[in-house]
Image (tube, grey):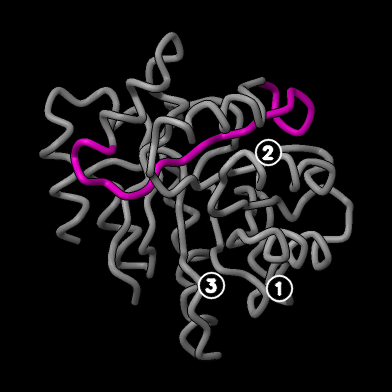
Amino acid sequence: MHATVLAPSILAGDHANLASSAQSVESLGIPWIHLDIMDGHFVPNLTFGPQTVAALRKISGLFFDTHLMLDEPQRYIEPFAKAGSNLISIHIEPVYDHTSTLARIRELGCQNGIVLNPGTPAEAIEPLLDKVDLVLVMTVQPGFGGQPFRRDMLPKIARIARWREERGLTFRLEVDGGIDLKTGPECRAAGVDTFVAGTSFFGASDKAAVAKTFAGW
């Protein structure tokens, strides 16, 4: 299993000063940050686009874990790659050519990921497991932060982790939604190695302690 990675979600940071939020992550020695890109169609919320990512890249050396919650992610791969994303994840649910889009992400020099919503069975992404660097299992319905963790996702996570082991694959297994110091260990036990934490990180009075706890799993 991969070493544990914490990817604080900047969606829960200070939107009036995203640079400061990113720098607070970097100052703690946390290597990743999670960037939620929402289009108001695939999910009922809007966040930011490639220009914001590019602006953050100018002031940050963090690994940009960019999660596209878009109806047509294939149209935006290149702008987000050029903006400085290190990994770009796309959802399985919209209808488009997932395989070619994942290949294109790698062609542009980024790692790739496939994402599935709570209502989507693990089998939907099974044919793509040997083509990805990361699988992201949403443990809330995407669109808004602060939702409670769905424990009924744990069997799905464990199934994907089992497929990874059985097939000798090396993709990271990430969770996003309601992840904190209580729910994180349950996910780690199911096979997760990469944790997106929004409210539980940026809302913590002692972010360093939170980071240290995640790193110890």
Magenta range is 26-45
Q: Earlier in the sequence, mark 3 or mark 1?
A: 1
Badge 3: residue crowd in 10 Å (few <14, some 14–19, many ≥20) = many
Q: Are marks 1 and 2 in contact (CB under 8 Å)?
A: no
Q: Position of residue 9 (x, y in %)?
A: 42, 35
Quarter in which the C terminus is drawn: bottom left
Quote the CA–CA distance across marks 1 and 2. Answer: 18 Å
Looking at the image, which residue sits at the far right? 96
In magenta segment, residue 38: yes
Q: Residues within 10 Å of mark 1 (few under 14, many from 20)?
A: some
Q: Residue at x 64, y 80 (%)?
A: 130
Q: Give the residue pinned by disc 1.
A: 128
Could you tell me which residue is drawn at 71 percent across and 73 percent down?
128
Q: Residue at x 32, y 56 (%)?
A: 5
Disc 3 marks a residue whose amino acid type is Ile
| Mark 1: secondary structure | helix
**Distance CA(mark 2)–CA(mark 3):** 21 Å
According to the picture, the residue beneath numbered tag 2 turns out to be 69
**Is 164 situated left or right of 198 in this image?**
right
The residue under label 3 is 160
User: Where is residue 192 shown, x and y percent of the image?
Assistant: 38, 64
